[in-house]
Image (spheres, rainbow, N blue to C red):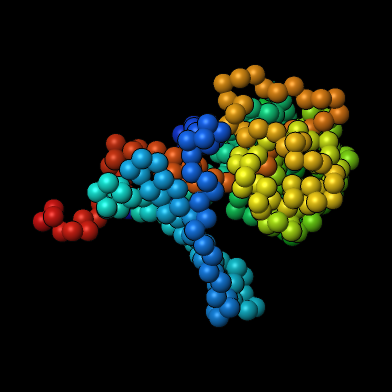
Amino acid sequence: MRLLSEADVERLTDPELAIRAATEAFRMQAAGAATGPGALGRLDLRQPGAGLLALAGFEGDSLLVKTNVHAHPAGGHRTGGSLVTLWDVAQGRPVALIAARGFNGHRTAAGFAAAAQLLAREDASVLTVFGAGRLAGSTLRYLVGVRPIRRVLIVGRTPGRAEALAAEAWAWPGFEGVAVEACDDPAAAAACADIIATTTTADNAVFPGAVVRPGTFVVLGGANRPTAREADDELIRRAMIYPDHREGALAKAGDLLLPLAAGTIKEEAIGVEIGALLGGPAPALTAGFVSVFKSIGIARQDLMLAQALLRRAEERGVGTVLDLEGLAA
């Protein structure tokens, strides 16, 4: 079994590899060749204020199991970790154990970028990101890499975090000539954007949909709970919506479930899965509409990226090989 640390994952992962893995995952999902979202179960521990979420996905002889554990002690800040285990089920043995905190950011942001390559205008130059956490940083890097972004606005619940992320981004490779700034006006930030990405844990809409310009591409990437949303009814009413996993989105995405319950849209307004657009022309937007990618995440994304990282690690000799059965001796 090969062990890949957080540092190993960063050495091995680049946007081209991660976006290619996400694109293939979406293609297979839309073709009906992928497993579902993969949630196995959740465990909540009131004492000491912790929880676990387990997910799985499989293809052929490969099985992936991901465990996310978070701790939120009273009076403290929420922390957490994540591990991915990749199994060869034909032989009944684990082949990789991957530290997945950074992996999760690459996997999710690469999915956003793959969708942007399909739906965002070629000349998109202004990006607004709602949220200033770990996923926001990955989202900035990946979206700036696939469109000619020259201005980035970051809107955070805590202004200090947005300002800190903006200051950090100025020094990133590939951000030369990109003006990155924090913004405390959600409406203004949404109104000037060509691309909007939300990466929050919000319960309610984080910007007014009425101000979003026609032709804007919107990624709704957070708040995946039936009673939570990042977009309001007005945005969804104007949207051509493409989920990564239709059944999963209709089961747990409040961004869709709440407008459906209110009668703002009907289920037919939700378009094909994003992977169904691969290999064809980008859909034409109806006048006044915006395009929305609703991301809940699919197990195939984790599996495809983990397999790609393992192959690259074996080729480059990266990671630590652990002989669980002691056969090498």
Q: Which residue is at a point 10% across and 56% down the rendered structure image?
A: 329
Camera-nearest residue between 225 and 263: 263
* Residue 253 visible in the picture: yes
In which image quadrant can residue 164 be found?
A: bottom right
- How many marks the image carries: the answer is 0
Instruction: Name the residue located 79 percent from the left edge and 28 percent from the top edge.
Output: 215
- Please state the horizontal and vertical placement of residue 304, each as a whole percent of the image: 44, 40
Q: Residue furthest right?
A: 210
- Is 91 left, or right, of 202 in this rendering? left
Answer with the quarter of the image where residue 195 lies: top right
Q: Position of residue 186 (x, y in %)?
A: 83, 48
Residue 314 as seen in the image, left or right of residue 219 = left
Image coords of residue 158 (percent x, y)? 74, 60
Given residues 295 and 48, the one toward you in this image is 295
Residue 324: give x, y in percent of width and height: 22, 58
Residue at the spot x=48%, y=44% of the render?
A: 35
Which residue sits at x=42%, y=54%? 65
Residue 131 shows up from this direction: no
Q: Is residue 112 above or below residue 163?
A: above
Q: Is residue 287 above or below residue 49?
A: above
Q: Is residue 226 above or below residue 32?
A: below
